[in-house]
Amino acid sequence: MNPTVSTPLPWHQTVFAQWLSRQHSERPAHASLIIAPEDTGGEQLVEAMAAAVLCESPTSEQHACGICGSCQLIAAFSHPDYRLLRPSIMDMAHPIEEMRPEKPSKEITIDDVRALDNMVNQTSHRGGKRVVVVYPAHKLNRNAANALLKTLEEPPENTLFILLAHDVQQLIPTIVSRCQLVVAGAPSPESAVTYLNSITPNPRWAEYLQQENGAVMRVAELIRTDYFSIEQNFIEQLSRGQDIDVIAVATALEKHIKDADKARLAGAPKTIDMATLITWLQRWAHDLTLMAQKGGAARYYPKYAQAMAKTIDNAPASLAIQVHAWQLELARERRIADHPLNIRSWIEKLLLAYVALI
Ligand SMILES: [Zn+2]
């Protein structure tokens, strides 16, 4: 099969088969809402659904063949009866240069939804169905969501809508009620490790998965970068407690963040930015809080449990309260993390706040 047409990941095979059988029944859905946790392969699933419906020569299991005219057009991003509706910022590194946005938006706008009218009001170019995929559907802004709702209320003929969101609560209930709900779960840790090992064997997959809250596709992407080694070095420094070299750490991180920024503009995956750094600190704070409780165990960085225990022993008795205040501060900092004036001094401030409480 042509690898450029999406196939669902192993843990989505059953849900995919069930959905296909409904689509081939007498009462297929006009709109499906797929719920899958972030970075667990939901995108591949909805794209595989779209490709299967549009395929002109599906396999015996009704999957896309990967070689027919329709499958080739999908792979070339030029199928006239297929639209992918997503925030234009996600197209910044689109393989086709003309498809990169001039003014990237983090939301799906009403103009994006209106641009569908042309397609859904004409007859299908290739004589089959038309498919509109929307993801992440919670990025529809209010006006766009209302416009899409109108379309779903009076569904155009022969058109299938497939929405993907991470949580059903993120969508307005009127949209949810118009869709067939499909819950596509996350993989178990074991199947995620099996999958990652099938790409590249690595004895640390389970550890990375735990750190990234089971976001298997994000882990698969990050392993191609120096993300995990930067994180490891940073946590190593935090584990030194009062002996952390604040200036050296801040200088090194500033460089990594600037390098990652440059690489991202060239189409590299999102790796480390200021928000990532806050996340690592929040995880460290979370683990410290757990460890400070009687019988508590670290959730994210169990490898450093001993260093954490030592920090807790040496810290003032009010550590738990102080860490809680620091967590609130981190949450506030996270909101401005996109725009610090000076990255290095911002990191120094965050680290000094930590050193002050232990
Ligand atoms: Zn095909």
Image (cartoon, helix red, strand yellow):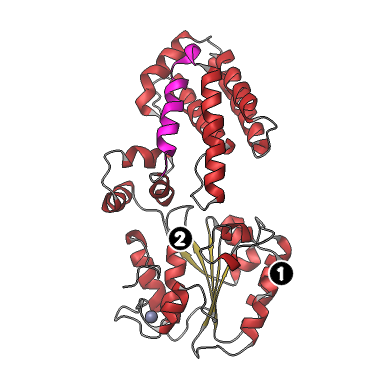
**Residue 135 figure quarter:** bottom right
In the depicted structure, whether residue 249 falls above or below residue 317: below
The three-letter code of the residue at mark 2 reads Gly
Q: Which mark is residue 111?
A: 1
Taking 282 as reference, is 1 left or right?
A: left
The one of 235 and 177 positioned closer to us in this rendering: 235
For the magenta stretch, what is the residue range? Answer: 225-244
Is 228 inside the magenta-drawn segment? yes
Where is residue 83 drawn, in percent x and y? 56, 74
The one of 9 and 102 positioned closer to us in this rendering: 102
Number of disc labels = 2
Q: Residue at x 64, y 36 (%)?
A: 337
**What is the CA distance from the residue labelled 1 to the residue labelled 2?**
25 Å
Q: Residue at x 55, y 15 (%)?
A: 355
The three-letter code of the residue at mark 1 reads Asp
- The reply to whether the C-beta atoms of the residues labelled 1 and 2 are less than 8 Å apart is no
Q: Residue at x 48, y 27 (%)?
A: 284
Taking 349 as reference, is 46 left or right?
A: left
In the depicted structure, whether residue 158 falls above or below residue 228: below
Where is residue 172 drawn, in percent x and y? 65, 62
On the rendered image, what quadrant is the N terminus found in?
A: bottom left
Q: Which residue is mark 2?
A: 42
Where is residue 248 drawn, in percent x and y? 52, 20
